[in-house]
Amino acid sequence: MKTILVIADGLAGRPDDTEAGTCLQVAKTPTIDGLVSRGTAGLMHPIKPGVRPGSDTAHLSLFGYDPYQYYTGRGVFEAAGIGMELSENDVSFRTNFATIDPDGKIADRRAGRISEGQEELEEALSGLTSEKYPDVEIRFKTSTEHRGALSISGDGLGGNVTPTDPHELGVPIPQSQGLDERSSKTADVLNEVTSQARDLLESAPINVQRREEGKLPANAILSRGAAKYPDIPPVEEVYGITASVVAAGALYIGVARVAGMEYIPVEGATGTVDSKIINKAKAALKELDRGKDLVFIHMKGTDNASHDHNAEAKVKFIEKIDETFAWLDDNIDWSETHLCFTGDHTTPINYGDHVAEPVPAMAIGPNVKPDNVEKFDEYTAMNGGLGTFNGQILPITLSYSDQLKKFGA
Ligand SMILES: [Zn+2]
Protein backbone atom coordinates (compact mmCIF):
# COMPACT_ATOMS: atom_id res chain seq x y z
CA MET A 1 0.00 0.00 0.00
CA LYS A 2 1.05 3.58 -0.73
CA THR A 3 0.15 6.88 0.90
CA ILE A 4 -0.10 10.43 -0.43
CA LEU A 5 -0.45 13.31 2.02
CA VAL A 6 -1.44 16.65 0.50
CA ILE A 7 -1.28 19.75 2.70
CA ALA A 8 -2.54 23.09 1.42
CA ASP A 9 -1.07 25.73 3.70
CA GLY A 10 -3.58 27.89 5.57
CA LEU A 11 -6.41 26.10 3.72
CA ALA A 12 -9.23 26.80 6.17
CA GLY A 13 -10.98 30.13 6.77
CA ARG A 14 -13.83 31.90 8.51
CA PRO A 15 -17.45 32.69 7.56
CA ASP A 16 -16.53 36.27 6.64
CA ASP A 17 -13.80 35.31 4.14
CA THR A 18 -16.25 36.28 1.39
CA GLU A 19 -19.88 37.40 1.29
CA ALA A 20 -20.82 33.81 0.51
CA GLY A 21 -18.74 32.15 3.22
CA THR A 22 -15.28 30.60 3.47
CA CYS A 23 -13.07 30.32 0.40
CA LEU A 24 -13.42 26.52 0.53
CA GLN A 25 -17.21 26.93 0.45
CA VAL A 26 -17.10 29.36 -2.46
CA ALA A 27 -14.50 27.58 -4.63
CA LYS A 28 -15.80 25.22 -7.30
CA THR A 29 -14.22 21.90 -6.38
CA PRO A 30 -16.05 19.08 -8.20
CA THR A 31 -13.12 16.67 -7.95
CA ILE A 32 -12.40 17.23 -4.26
CA ASP A 33 -16.12 16.88 -3.50
CA GLY A 34 -16.23 13.70 -5.57
CA LEU A 35 -13.26 12.33 -3.67
CA VAL A 36 -14.69 13.11 -0.25
CA SER A 37 -17.96 11.46 -1.31
CA ARG A 38 -15.95 8.26 -1.79
CA GLY A 39 -14.01 8.83 1.44
CA THR A 40 -14.28 10.20 4.94
CA ALA A 41 -13.86 13.66 6.47
CA GLY A 42 -13.19 15.22 9.84
CA LEU A 43 -12.07 18.33 11.64
CA MET A 44 -8.48 18.53 12.78
CA HIS A 45 -7.05 20.80 15.45
CA PRO A 46 -3.53 21.08 13.97
CA ILE A 47 -1.83 20.90 17.40
CA LYS A 48 -4.63 20.97 19.97
CA PRO A 49 -7.65 23.18 20.65
CA GLY A 50 -6.73 26.74 21.52
CA VAL A 51 -3.20 26.68 20.09
CA ARG A 52 -2.38 29.04 17.19
CA PRO A 53 0.02 26.94 15.14
CA GLY A 54 3.06 28.10 13.25
CA SER A 55 3.48 26.24 9.97
CA ASP A 56 6.52 24.39 11.31
CA THR A 57 4.99 23.22 14.61
CA ALA A 58 1.75 22.32 12.76
CA HIS A 59 3.60 20.16 10.24
CA LEU A 60 5.44 18.32 13.01
CA SER A 61 2.10 17.64 14.67
CA LEU A 62 0.47 16.51 11.41
CA PHE A 63 3.38 14.12 10.86
CA GLY A 64 2.70 12.63 14.30
CA TYR A 65 5.50 14.33 16.27
CA ASP A 66 4.72 16.19 19.50
CA PRO A 67 5.95 19.73 18.74
CA TYR A 68 6.26 20.46 22.47
CA GLN A 69 8.84 17.68 22.65
CA TYR A 70 10.67 18.17 19.37
CA TYR A 71 10.45 21.79 18.24
CA THR A 72 13.66 23.78 18.77
CA GLY A 73 13.03 26.75 16.45
CA ARG A 74 12.55 27.74 12.84
CA GLY A 75 16.18 28.32 11.79
CA VAL A 76 17.06 24.66 11.49
CA PHE A 77 14.15 23.96 9.11
CA GLU A 78 14.98 26.99 6.95
CA ALA A 79 18.62 25.88 6.76
CA ALA A 80 17.74 22.24 6.00
CA GLY A 81 15.15 23.47 3.48
CA ILE A 82 17.75 25.29 1.38
CA GLY A 83 19.95 22.22 1.27
CA MET A 84 22.31 22.55 4.24
CA GLU A 85 23.39 19.21 5.67
CA LEU A 86 22.96 19.52 9.43
CA SER A 87 23.64 17.40 12.50
CA GLU A 88 23.22 17.56 16.27
CA ASN A 89 26.28 19.84 16.67
CA ASP A 90 24.65 22.63 14.66
CA VAL A 91 22.81 25.73 15.72
CA SER A 92 21.06 27.25 12.70
CA PHE A 93 19.56 30.64 11.95
CA ARG A 94 17.53 32.13 9.16
CA THR A 95 19.14 35.28 7.89
CA ASN A 96 18.40 38.42 5.91
CA PHE A 97 20.82 40.48 3.91
CA ALA A 98 20.31 44.01 5.17
CA THR A 99 21.59 47.50 4.45
CA ILE A 100 23.47 49.35 7.17
CA ASP A 101 23.87 53.12 6.71
CA PRO A 102 27.18 54.99 7.28
CA ASP A 103 26.15 55.64 10.93
CA GLY A 104 25.98 51.89 11.54
CA LYS A 105 22.19 51.79 11.69
CA ILE A 106 19.83 49.46 9.86
CA ALA A 107 18.43 51.29 6.82
CA ASP A 108 16.67 48.33 5.14
CA ARG A 109 16.08 44.87 6.62
CA ARG A 110 16.05 43.28 3.15
CA ALA A 111 18.75 45.22 1.27
CA GLY A 112 16.12 46.49 -1.18
CA ARG A 113 14.83 42.93 -1.65
CA ILE A 114 18.07 42.20 -3.46
CA SER A 115 17.29 40.05 -6.49
CA GLU A 116 20.72 39.27 -7.95
CA GLY A 117 24.29 38.53 -6.87
CA GLN A 118 23.38 35.88 -4.28
CA GLU A 119 26.26 33.65 -5.41
CA GLU A 120 28.80 36.46 -5.04
CA LEU A 121 27.45 37.31 -1.59
CA GLU A 122 27.64 33.68 -0.49
CA GLU A 123 31.18 33.52 -1.86
CA ALA A 124 32.10 36.67 0.09
CA LEU A 125 30.95 34.96 3.29
CA SER A 126 32.65 31.63 2.61
CA GLY A 127 35.58 32.55 4.85
CA LEU A 128 33.65 33.22 8.06
CA THR A 129 35.53 31.95 11.12
CA SER A 130 35.57 32.45 14.86
CA GLU A 131 38.86 33.73 16.26
CA LYS A 132 37.70 33.14 19.81
CA TYR A 133 36.64 29.53 19.12
CA PRO A 134 38.72 28.24 16.18
CA ASP A 135 37.19 24.75 16.59
CA VAL A 136 33.78 26.09 15.60
CA GLU A 137 32.75 25.72 11.95
CA ILE A 138 30.64 28.40 10.29
CA ARG A 139 28.62 27.95 7.13
CA PHE A 140 26.44 30.38 5.25
CA LYS A 141 24.08 29.69 2.35
CA THR A 142 21.87 32.06 0.40
CA SER A 143 18.30 31.25 -0.56
CA THR A 144 16.01 33.51 -2.61
CA GLU A 145 16.27 37.34 -2.64
CA HIS A 146 17.55 38.58 0.74
CA ARG A 147 17.05 35.25 2.49
CA GLY A 148 19.65 32.81 3.67
CA ALA A 149 20.74 30.57 6.52
CA LEU A 150 23.68 30.47 8.89
CA SER A 151 24.89 27.42 10.72
CA ILE A 152 27.34 27.44 13.63
CA SER A 153 28.73 24.01 14.35
CA GLY A 154 30.80 22.73 17.26
CA ASP A 155 30.77 20.89 20.57
CA GLY A 156 28.67 22.21 23.42
CA LEU A 157 26.78 24.95 21.59
CA GLY A 158 23.37 25.91 22.99
CA GLY A 159 20.55 27.22 20.81
CA ASN A 160 19.07 29.60 23.34
CA VAL A 161 20.28 32.94 21.97
CA THR A 162 18.59 36.24 21.17
CA PRO A 163 18.35 37.34 17.50
CA THR A 164 20.54 39.96 15.86
CA ASP A 165 17.54 41.04 13.78
CA PRO A 166 15.68 43.70 15.80
CA HIS A 167 12.81 43.88 13.26
CA GLU A 168 13.13 47.66 13.21
CA LEU A 169 14.97 50.36 11.29
CA GLY A 170 17.23 53.20 12.45
CA VAL A 171 18.91 51.11 15.16
CA PRO A 172 22.31 49.38 15.20
CA ILE A 173 22.49 45.58 14.93
CA PRO A 174 21.88 44.33 18.48
CA GLN A 175 24.39 42.03 20.18
CA SER A 176 23.11 38.49 20.60
CA GLN A 177 22.84 37.25 24.19
CA GLY A 178 23.11 33.64 25.29
CA LEU A 179 20.37 32.73 27.71
CA ASP A 180 22.39 29.92 29.34
CA GLU A 181 26.07 29.03 29.58
CA ARG A 182 26.26 26.86 26.45
CA SER A 183 24.29 29.41 24.50
CA SER A 184 26.67 32.21 25.56
CA LYS A 185 29.34 30.56 23.43
CA THR A 186 26.91 30.48 20.48
CA ALA A 187 26.03 34.15 21.01
CA ASP A 188 29.76 35.08 21.14
CA VAL A 189 30.35 33.33 17.81
CA LEU A 190 27.22 34.87 16.27
CA ASN A 191 28.36 38.37 17.30
CA GLU A 192 31.85 37.74 15.89
CA VAL A 193 30.38 36.40 12.63
CA THR A 194 27.92 39.29 12.32
CA SER A 195 30.69 41.86 12.60
CA GLN A 196 33.02 39.89 10.27
CA ALA A 197 30.23 39.62 7.70
CA ARG A 198 29.87 43.40 7.70
CA ASP A 199 33.54 43.84 6.75
CA LEU A 200 33.47 41.08 4.14
CA LEU A 201 30.25 42.33 2.55
CA GLU A 202 31.19 46.01 2.64
CA SER A 203 34.12 45.41 0.29
CA ALA A 204 32.49 42.71 -1.87
CA PRO A 205 32.54 43.71 -5.58
CA ILE A 206 28.79 43.12 -5.91
CA ASN A 207 28.15 45.81 -3.28
CA VAL A 208 30.57 48.26 -4.89
CA GLN A 209 28.60 47.74 -8.09
CA ARG A 210 25.24 48.10 -6.32
CA ARG A 211 26.31 51.44 -4.84
CA GLU A 212 27.39 52.67 -8.29
CA GLU A 213 23.97 51.70 -9.63
CA GLY A 214 22.26 53.59 -6.80
CA LYS A 215 21.03 50.36 -5.21
CA LEU A 216 21.13 49.53 -1.51
CA PRO A 217 24.20 47.44 -0.65
CA ALA A 218 23.70 44.08 1.07
CA ASN A 219 26.34 44.92 3.66
CA ALA A 220 25.17 42.98 6.72
CA ILE A 221 23.40 39.81 7.78
CA LEU A 222 20.68 39.78 10.42
CA SER A 223 20.01 36.41 12.08
CA ARG A 224 16.94 35.06 13.84
CA GLY A 225 15.09 31.83 14.62
CA ALA A 226 18.09 30.21 16.38
CA ALA A 227 17.58 26.47 16.62
CA LYS A 228 19.63 23.52 17.76
CA TYR A 229 19.25 20.50 15.50
CA PRO A 230 16.17 18.72 16.88
CA ASP A 231 16.28 15.12 18.04
CA ILE A 232 13.48 14.02 15.67
CA PRO A 233 13.45 10.31 14.81
CA PRO A 234 13.00 9.88 11.03
CA VAL A 235 9.73 8.50 9.62
CA GLU A 236 11.63 5.37 8.62
CA GLU A 237 12.28 4.67 12.31
CA VAL A 238 8.87 5.77 13.62
CA TYR A 239 6.68 4.19 10.93
CA GLY A 240 9.03 1.89 9.03
CA ILE A 241 8.36 3.71 5.75
CA THR A 242 10.38 5.53 3.09
CA ALA A 243 9.15 8.98 2.11
CA SER A 244 9.67 11.89 -0.28
CA VAL A 245 8.63 15.52 -0.05
CA VAL A 246 7.42 17.59 -3.00
CA ALA A 247 7.32 21.25 -1.95
CA ALA A 248 8.76 24.64 -2.85
CA GLY A 249 8.92 26.61 0.41
CA ALA A 250 12.18 26.12 2.34
CA LEU A 251 10.42 25.78 5.69
CA TYR A 252 8.30 22.82 4.54
CA ILE A 253 11.12 21.12 2.69
CA GLY A 254 13.18 21.58 5.85
CA VAL A 255 10.64 20.07 8.28
CA ALA A 256 10.20 17.10 5.95
CA ARG A 257 13.95 16.60 5.44
CA VAL A 258 14.60 16.72 9.18
CA ALA A 259 11.85 14.07 9.53
CA GLY A 260 13.80 11.90 7.09
CA MET A 261 11.94 12.54 3.82
CA GLU A 262 13.87 12.89 0.56
CA TYR A 263 13.41 16.24 -1.17
CA ILE A 264 12.37 16.02 -4.83
CA PRO A 265 12.73 19.32 -6.72
CA VAL A 266 9.94 20.07 -9.20
CA GLU A 267 10.08 22.36 -12.22
CA GLY A 268 7.68 25.29 -12.00
CA ALA A 269 6.99 24.83 -8.29
CA THR A 270 7.35 28.28 -6.76
CA GLY A 271 5.56 28.24 -3.40
CA THR A 272 3.22 30.99 -4.64
CA VAL A 273 -0.27 31.16 -6.18
CA ASP A 274 1.39 30.91 -9.63
CA SER A 275 3.04 27.57 -8.85
CA LYS A 276 2.65 24.75 -11.40
CA ILE A 277 1.22 22.40 -8.78
CA ILE A 278 0.22 19.82 -11.39
CA ASN A 279 3.95 19.09 -11.72
CA LYS A 280 4.02 18.29 -8.00
CA ALA A 281 1.31 15.69 -8.47
CA LYS A 282 3.21 14.13 -11.39
CA ALA A 283 6.45 14.08 -9.37
CA ALA A 284 4.62 12.48 -6.44
CA LEU A 285 3.30 9.54 -8.47
CA LYS A 286 6.79 9.07 -9.93
CA GLU A 287 8.12 8.76 -6.38
CA LEU A 288 5.57 6.06 -5.57
CA ASP A 289 6.56 4.25 -8.79
CA ARG A 290 10.16 4.53 -7.67
CA GLY A 291 9.22 2.52 -4.59
CA LYS A 292 8.59 5.17 -1.94
CA ASP A 293 5.87 4.32 0.59
CA LEU A 294 4.78 7.91 1.23
CA VAL A 295 4.84 11.20 -0.65
CA PHE A 296 4.09 14.46 1.11
CA ILE A 297 2.95 17.23 -1.25
CA HIS A 298 2.90 20.78 0.10
CA MET A 299 1.06 23.67 -1.58
CA LYS A 300 1.62 27.17 -0.29
CA GLY A 301 -0.59 29.47 -2.40
CA THR A 302 -3.64 29.24 -0.12
CA ASP A 303 -1.69 30.70 2.79
CA ASN A 304 0.00 33.45 0.73
CA ALA A 305 -3.40 34.65 -0.52
CA SER A 306 -4.80 34.56 3.03
CA HIS A 307 -1.95 36.64 4.44
CA ASP A 308 -2.54 39.08 1.57
CA HIS A 309 -6.29 39.30 2.49
CA ASN A 310 -7.01 38.17 -1.07
CA ALA A 311 -10.10 35.92 -1.08
CA GLU A 312 -10.30 35.87 -4.88
CA ALA A 313 -6.75 34.54 -5.21
CA LYS A 314 -7.38 31.95 -2.50
CA VAL A 315 -10.55 30.71 -4.21
CA LYS A 316 -8.70 30.52 -7.54
CA PHE A 317 -5.82 28.60 -6.00
CA ILE A 318 -8.22 26.12 -4.34
CA GLU A 319 -9.78 25.60 -7.79
CA LYS A 320 -6.29 24.95 -9.17
CA ILE A 321 -5.78 22.35 -6.43
CA ASP A 322 -9.06 20.78 -7.55
CA GLU A 323 -7.73 20.50 -11.14
CA THR A 324 -4.59 18.88 -9.76
CA PHE A 325 -6.71 16.37 -7.86
CA ALA A 326 -8.55 15.59 -11.11
CA TRP A 327 -5.23 14.51 -12.63
CA LEU A 328 -4.36 12.54 -9.49
CA ASP A 329 -7.77 10.83 -9.45
CA ASP A 330 -7.23 9.66 -13.04
CA ASN A 331 -3.69 8.45 -12.43
CA ILE A 332 -3.55 7.05 -8.89
CA ASP A 333 -3.78 3.28 -8.61
CA TRP A 334 -6.71 3.31 -6.19
CA SER A 335 -6.42 -0.39 -5.46
CA GLU A 336 -3.25 0.24 -3.44
CA THR A 337 -3.16 3.94 -2.51
CA HIS A 338 -4.60 6.09 0.27
CA LEU A 339 -4.79 9.82 -0.21
CA CYS A 340 -5.26 12.42 2.49
CA PHE A 341 -5.95 16.13 1.99
CA THR A 342 -5.95 18.80 4.66
CA GLY A 343 -4.43 22.15 5.70
CA ASP A 344 -1.88 22.91 8.40
CA HIS A 345 -3.96 25.66 10.03
CA THR A 346 -6.75 28.17 9.47
CA THR A 347 -5.71 31.53 7.97
CA PRO A 348 -8.81 33.75 7.67
CA ILE A 349 -8.83 36.35 4.89
CA ASN A 350 -9.71 39.32 7.11
CA TYR A 351 -7.46 38.42 10.01
CA GLY A 352 -4.57 37.58 7.66
CA ASP A 353 -2.69 35.33 10.06
CA HIS A 354 -2.91 31.85 11.56
CA VAL A 355 -5.67 31.18 14.12
CA ALA A 356 -6.36 28.20 16.38
CA GLU A 357 -9.58 26.99 14.71
CA PRO A 358 -9.71 23.44 13.33
CA VAL A 359 -9.17 22.53 9.68
CA PRO A 360 -11.15 20.10 7.50
CA ALA A 361 -9.35 16.88 6.61
CA MET A 362 -10.28 13.96 4.39
CA ALA A 363 -9.00 10.50 3.52
CA ILE A 364 -9.82 8.29 0.52
CA GLY A 365 -8.71 4.80 -0.45
CA PRO A 366 -9.66 1.12 -0.45
CA ASN A 367 -9.70 0.72 3.35
CA VAL A 368 -11.62 3.93 4.09
CA LYS A 369 -15.26 3.54 5.12
CA PRO A 370 -17.17 6.34 3.35
CA ASP A 371 -19.32 8.64 5.47
CA ASN A 372 -22.14 10.96 4.41
CA VAL A 373 -19.96 14.01 3.62
CA GLU A 374 -20.32 14.93 -0.06
CA LYS A 375 -18.73 18.36 -0.17
CA PHE A 376 -15.44 19.36 1.42
CA ASP A 377 -15.35 22.46 3.61
CA GLU A 378 -15.13 23.68 7.21
CA TYR A 379 -18.83 22.99 7.87
CA THR A 380 -19.42 19.64 6.19
CA ALA A 381 -16.28 18.21 7.79
CA MET A 382 -17.98 18.57 11.18
CA ASN A 383 -20.22 15.65 10.21
CA GLY A 384 -17.55 13.28 8.94
CA GLY A 385 -16.48 9.88 10.12
CA LEU A 386 -13.02 10.98 11.24
CA GLY A 387 -14.68 13.14 13.91
CA THR A 388 -12.66 15.88 15.56
CA PHE A 389 -9.04 15.12 16.38
CA ASN A 390 -5.66 16.72 17.12
CA GLY A 391 -2.92 16.63 14.41
CA GLN A 392 -1.69 13.08 13.65
CA ILE A 393 -3.21 13.01 10.16
CA LEU A 394 -0.17 11.16 8.79
CA PRO A 395 -0.42 8.18 11.18
CA ILE A 396 -4.19 8.17 10.70
CA THR A 397 -3.69 7.77 6.95
CA LEU A 398 -0.77 5.35 7.31
CA SER A 399 -3.02 3.05 9.32
CA TYR A 400 -5.35 2.71 6.32
CA SER A 401 -2.31 1.76 4.25
CA ASP A 402 -1.19 -0.88 6.79
CA GLN A 403 1.99 1.13 7.32
CA LEU A 404 1.62 1.74 11.06
CA LYS A 405 3.49 -0.07 13.80
CA LYS A 406 1.51 -1.57 16.67
CA PHE A 407 1.62 0.12 20.10
CA GLY A 408 2.03 -2.66 22.65
CA ALA A 409 1.74 -6.44 22.26
ZN1 LIG B 1 1.21 27.05 7.33
Image (cartoon, rainbow, N blue to C red):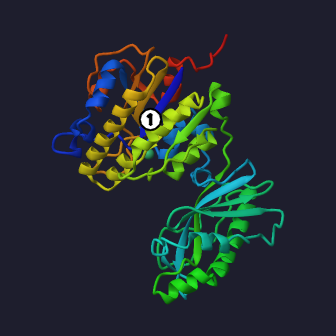
Which of the 4 image quadrants contains residue 333? Answer: top left
In the rendered image, the vertical position of residue 228 relative to residue 14, given as above or below: below
Residue 15 lies in what quarter of the image?
A: top left
Q: Residue at x 52, y 69 (%)?
A: 166
**Where in the figure is residue 35, as x and y percent of width and height?**
33, 25
- Asked whether residue 43 appears in the rendered view, the answer is no
26 relative to 147, above or below: above
What is the number of callouts on the image? Answer: 1
Observer-nearest of 112 and 121: 121
List the residue tagged with mark 1: 6
Extreme-right residue of the structure: 135
Query: Considering only vertical position in the picture, is 379 above or below 76?
Result: above
* Label 1: which secondary element: strand
| Foreground of the two, 71 or 2 | 2
Residue 23, position as x, y percentages in the image: 26, 41
Q: Residue furthest top?
A: 409
Picture residue at 49% right of the left edge, 33% below the top? 285
Q: Is the CB of mark 1 within 8 Å of ligand 1?
A: no
Q: Quadrant of the C terminus?
A: top right
Amino acid at circle 1: Val
- Residue at position x 39%, y 13% in the image: 369
Task: Report whether 111 appears left or right of 224.
Answer: left
Instruction: Tell me: 94 left or right of 396.
Output: right
Q: Quadrant of ligand 1?
A: top left
Q: Position of residue 203 (x, y in %)?
A: 64, 84
**Disc 1 crowd, CA 10 A, few/some/many (<14, 14-19, 20+):** many
Q: Is residue 191 above or below residue 285?
A: below
